Amino acid sequence: MGFGPFFVSASRGAFMAALEAVVEPVVTGMGYELVELQAANGGRMLRLFIDKPGGIRVEDCAAVSRQLSRVLEVEGVDYERLEVSSPGLDRPLKRPADFVRFAGQRADVRMRTPDASGRRRFVGVLRGADGAHVNIELEGRTVQLELGDVERARLVPEL
């Protein structure tokens, strides 16, 4: 699939979905998790964040960058810059599996719509996810948040 003409006629969402369909199998095939994929400057700059148990080293980023550069060239993806890095200590949580994997750690979760008390931001200890809900412990009680209503979620670094 060539991305040059595709990008011109495709919406940003369609472009990102097609790009992720190319990038994710490469990253997972190398033993990493694709945490996030971003495109900036009209798709000219591609940035991805990878992770694996035990963390990411510079060598991991370099290996993924080399492999993706080859694949993106073969696929006809027209870009100028590719950045591969670790998601950092404040790693974003996107998938239900992220909330399960990082259970027991502090997280900052922002919802799209407020709860009955008007609250949209919840900072507490993750207690996992079960299907459509994220469980987070706040001030000694566990609250269920609708996974589909999560605007953004990140780990809170313990320094």
Image (cartoon, helix red, strand yellow):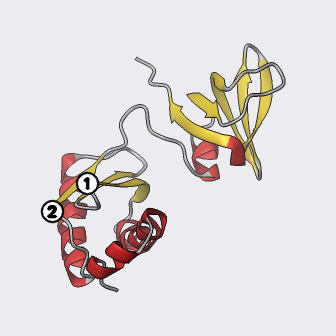
Residue 104 in sight: no
Pointer 2 and pointer 1: residues touching (CB < 8 Å)?
A: yes
Crowd around label 1: few <14 · some 14–19 · many ≥20 (10 Å): few
Return the mark for residue 127: none
Q: Tell me if residue 57 comes above or below residue 108 in the rendering.
A: below
Label 2 or label 1, whichever lies nearer to me, is 1
Crowd around label 2: few <14 · some 14–19 · many ≥20 (10 Å): few
Q: Residue at x 43, y 32 (%)?
A: 90
Return the mark for residue 41: 1
Residue 140 occupies which quadrant of the picture? top right
> Tag 1, which secondary structure?
loop
| Quadrant occupied by the C terminus | top left
Locate residue 59 relative to residue 18 in the image: left or right: left
Amino acid type assigned to the residue bearing label 2 in the image: Glu
Q: CA distance from mark 2 to mark 1?
A: 10 Å
Q: Tell me if residue 141 comes above or below residue 144 in the rendering.
A: above
Q: Which residue is mark 2?
A: 80
> Tag 2, which secondary structure?
loop
- Residue 120 image point, x, y percent: 68, 26
Q: Residue at x 61, y 31 (%)?
A: 110
Q: Residue at x 26, y 78 (%)?
A: 4
